[in-house]
Image: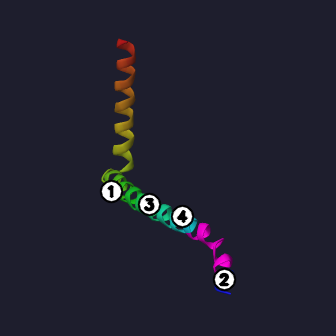
Amino acid sequence: ELKEKMDELLPLIPVLEQYKTDAKLITQFKEEIRNLSAVLTGIQEEIGAYDYEELHQRVLNLETRLRDCMKKL
């Protein structure tokens, strides 16, 4: 009877191993999401330091510099 019970449990071993692997992967994804959230928060804080006009002016300045570089090339 014990052997029959063990035979019933054998198919569960690969399922358990897959569960462990998936759980580790989910933990890694959570850590990556936390890191990404921290980076995005930093970017948001940096962008928040400028108002729209300042950002627009910076973009225009960068475009001008890019055009100047392209002319030199």
The mark lying in front, picked from 3 and 2, is 2
**What is the x, y in percent for residue 36?**
41, 56
Judge whether 14 appears above or below 53 on screen: below
Task: Name the residue carrying label 1.
Answer: 45
Main secondary structure type of the part rendered in magenta: helix
* Real-space CA distance between mark 1 and mark 2, rounded to the nearest whole angstrom: 59 Å
Closer-to-camera residue (42/28): 28
Task: Name the residue carrying label 3.
Answer: 28
Task: Name the residue carrying label 2.
Answer: 5
Look at label 1 and name its amino acid. Answer: Glu
The mark lying in front, picked from 4 and 1, is 4
Magenta region: 6-16
Q: Secondary structure at mark 4?
A: helix
Look at label 3 and name its amino acid. Answer: Gln
Residue at the location (39% across, 21% down)?
Answer: 67
Task: Name the residue carrying label 4.
Answer: 22
The mark lying in front, picked from 3 and 4, is 4
Q: Secondary structure at mark 3?
A: helix
Look at label 4 and name its amino acid. Answer: Asp
* Real-space CA distance between mark 4 and mark 1, rounded to the nearest whole angstrom: 34 Å
Residue at the farthest bottom position: 1
The mark lying in front, picked from 1 and 2, is 2
Q: Quadrant of the N terminus?
A: bottom right
The mark lying in front, picked from 2 and 4, is 2
**What is the x, y in percent for residue 27?**
45, 65
| Local crowd size for mark 1, using a 10 Å CA cut-off: few (<14), some (14–19), many (≥20) | few
* Real-space CA distance between mark 3 and mark 1, rounded to the nearest whole angstrom: 26 Å
Look at label 2 and name its amino acid. Answer: Lys
Of marks 3 and 1, which one's residue comes earlier in the chain?
Answer: 3
**What is the x, y in percent for residue 2?**
64, 85
* Real-space CA distance between mark 2 and mark 4, rounded to the nearest whole angstrom: 26 Å
17 on left or right of 33? right
